[in-house]
Amino acid sequence: MGGTNPYQTETEVALPTRPFQVTFLPMNVSIDVDPKDLPFDRDGRPGSLLDIAGRAGVEIDHACGGVCACSTCHVIVRQGFSTLHAASEDEEDMLDQAPGLEITSRLACQAVPSGAEDLVVEIPHWNRNHAREVPH
Ligand code: FES
């Protein structure tokens, strides 16, 4: 976990209660999310797209560790956008600094799906983390 941002106004976000699927593009990796397994205790808000991506083995840059203090985890939600809770003012402020902003842009570390619909999430090429740990 990346910790918390002490300057961020926390808003309570409910975790989903029904199973759903998230597909990450362009790698076309899908993960079935069972609410009883959430959160995955990866980076970002519990149950967030960054949390889910981490579990799916999908690397998304997240320079601040998932505490809404950068915009490197910017993703574009191609399907299921309405199932995400509303972005906080802090998230919108950070998103304003993201390149390639679209109407369905979100910060992966902050956006938590409700599970009402499957999601398709595109990771912009500049936010894909190609770095991998190499075993020594
Ligand atoms: S990782 Fe920094 S805002 Fe999401």
Image: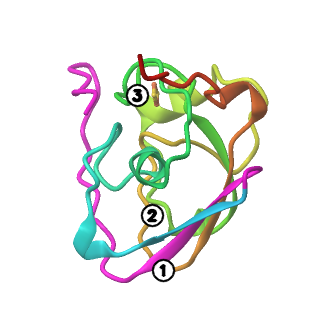
Disc number placed over residue 42 in the picture, else none: none
**Mark 1, secondary structure of its residue:** loop
* Residue pointed to by mark 2: 113
Instruction: Name the main secondary structure of what is drawn in magenta.
Output: loop
Q: Is residue 107 left or right of residue 121?
A: left
Q: Is residue 12 left or right of residue 122?
A: left
Q: Quadrant of residue 78?
A: bottom right
Residue labelled 2 has its Cβ within 8 Å of some atom of ligand 1 = no
Q: Are marks 2 and 1 in contact (CB under 8 Å)?
A: yes
Quadrant assignment for the N terminus = top left
Q: Quadrant of residue 135?
A: top left
Residue closer to the observer: 108 or 34: 34
Instruction: Identify the mark nearer the N-term, 3 or 2.
Output: 3
Q: Are marks 3 and 2 in contact (CB under 8 Å)?
A: no
Residue closer to the observer: 128 or 105: 128
| Label 3 to label 1: alpha-carbon separation | 24 Å
| Label 3 to label 2: alpha-carbon separation | 17 Å
Give the residue displayed 66% in from the left and 24% down from the top. Answer: 98
Asked if residue 90 is positioned above or below residue 46 in the image, the reply reads: above
Q: x%, y% of residue 95? A: 59, 30
Quadrant assignment for the C terminus = top left
Q: x%, y% of residue 126? A: 74, 25
* Residue pointed to by mark 3: 68
**Mark 2, secondary structure of its residue:** loop
